[in-house]
Image (tube, rainbow, N blue to C red):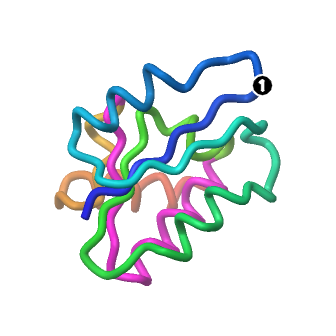
Amino acid sequence: MLLGYARVSTDDQDLALQREALEKAGCRRIHEEKLSGARRDRPQLARLLDQVREGDVVVVARLDRLARSTRDLLEIAELLKEGGAGLRSLGEPWADTTSPAGRMVLTVFAGIA
């Protein structure tokens, strides 16, 4: 199952474009948040990560919607990998852990970090 995650930083920003892109990509459920990405305590992200099952793919419009640092991104990607799930960014096609090339790119990022 494709699970979407959309986030904006403030209440006056709109999630509509992200929601539309995630729906168009085939996401069956979309978790939305209006919180700074720098915050570690994002309830909808925590709920999403708790609900992910083996074979699921978490989809984001852009990686900066999911994580604000390489370290956070790699931690989330590793959690998904441990659960048998994947990660895909619509805005960065190279960031797709469901493909061998995408897994390699994130492995290189992890090595650099």
Which residue is nearer to you in this view: 11 or 91? Answer: 11
Q: Position of residue 56 (x, y in %)?
A: 29, 69
Question: Which residue is drawn at the image coordinates 65% and 29% (left, top)?
Answer: 8
Q: Is residue 66 above or below residue 71?
A: above
Estimate how packed mark 1 is, as few (under 14), some (14 to 19) or many (20 or more) residues with alpha carbons within 10 Å: few
Which residue is nearer to you in this view: 76 or 58? Answer: 58
Magenta extent = 70-91
**Three-letter code for the amino acid on which mark 1 is drawn:** Thr
Question: Which residue is drawn at the image coordinates 43% and 73% (left, top)?
Answer: 52
The answer to whether 55 appears left or right of 22 in the picture is left
Q: Is residue 55 above or below residue 40?
A: below
* Residue, disc 1: 10
| The C terminus: image quadrant | bottom right
| The N terminus: image quadrant | bottom left
Q: Secondary structure at mark 1?
A: loop
The answer to whether 71 appears left or right of 18 in the picture is right
Count of picture labels: 1
Q: Position of residue 11 (x, y in %)?
A: 77, 25
* The magenta stretch spans residue 36: no
Q: Position of residue 59 (x, y in %)?
A: 37, 48
Q: Position of residue 41 (x, y in %)?
A: 80, 59
Question: Which residue is drawn at the image coordinates 43% and 83% (left, top)?
Answer: 82
